[in-house]
Image: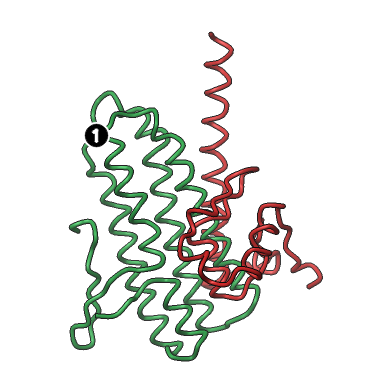
Amino acid sequence: MSQNAIIPLLKQFREKTLSANDLHEKLEGIVQFCERKQNKLGQVRILATDLESWQTYLKPALELSYKGLVAAAKMGQEYAKNPSQEIAEAIVYAFVQVDKSIAFVEKHSSNVSSETQSILQEEISQLPQDASNIPTIQQGHAQVVASIFND
Amino acid sequence: MGNMQVKSTQQGQKLGEELKSSGSEILDNVRTIRNAAAGVAAVGATAMAAQVLGVATIPAAIPTGLITLTAGSLALTTHLIVEIGEGLDNLINNSDQRKQLEAAGQ
């Protein structure tokens, strides 16, 4: 078991305990994971009374959160090729968008039912983990991302 | 840094100072340093990423040197981040406008 998420991977790379190629490969796994999670948002069942808030604000904000993680991971792949200060700042800026999206969801979650709030809380609590602490299982050469959402 | 100089909000500067002075312990519980004022939330993963990457000041915009790129994967990813920021700004603006309309209608 190892910890493979965007920020720990970047840390390992900076500490020279992870090669550029390995960083790129592991971040690609995270990109695919987050894209799957983003797509699954369309399958979430929401109470009719919350549908407008969900469709108008909550789902788009959660999608942007996952897109932000995808962007951070992709920018991390660029950092593997060229670890410049400029790209480092771009990665941080991508995380600004992720956190801003989460704050937006939290702000709007008070207007929906407790059932929807539970769904939102689950998503919100897991998003930072996608950035900082996705557990992965090493299976030979392949990396299997162990979903914390029962993916 | 010339034109690569990034602007920062007061919130970002404050966080940067905290990062410099407080070490990593505070970052272990990043939600406690949430600062969502003035549009830029310097919280959670942002603080952790900044600390890991040695970025002392949270950028309020994507570096201009990247924005000017027109081709390649770096340009595509840069524009993806810009699009996400714009999408979020639109969401926030729409929400604010709706609240104003609702308040005006009451």
Q: Nearer the viewer, residue A130 or A79?
A: A130
Q: Quadrant of the N terminus of chain B?
A: bottom right
Task: Say which residue appears at 62% left-offset and 80% top-offset.
Answer: A84
Task: Say which residue appears at 34% left-offset and 75% top-offset.
Answer: A4
Q: Chain of mark 1?
A: A
Task: Say which residue appears at 59% left-offset and 73% top-offset.
Answer: A88
Give the secondary structure at mark 1: helix
Q: Residue furthest top?
A: B106
Residue B18 percent across, percent down from the top left = 64, 63
Residue B15 percent across, percent down from the top left = 64, 59
Label 1 sits on residue: A115
Task: Say which residue appears at 33% left-offset and 45% top-offset.
Answer: A121
Q: Is residue A141 left or right of residue A93?
A: left
| Rendering colour mode | by chain
Chain A colour as displayed:
green
Indicate the amino acid at tag 1.
Answer: Glu
Chain B colour as displayed:
red
Q: From what the image shows, is residue B76 above or below residue A43?
A: below
Q: Residue furthest right?
A: B2
Q: Nearer the viewer, residue B64 or A117?
A: A117
Q: Nearer the viewer, residue A130 or B22?
A: B22
Q: From what the image shows, is residue B66 above or below residue B60?
A: below
Q: From what the image shows, is residue A107 above or below residue A145?
A: above
The mark tally for this picture is 1
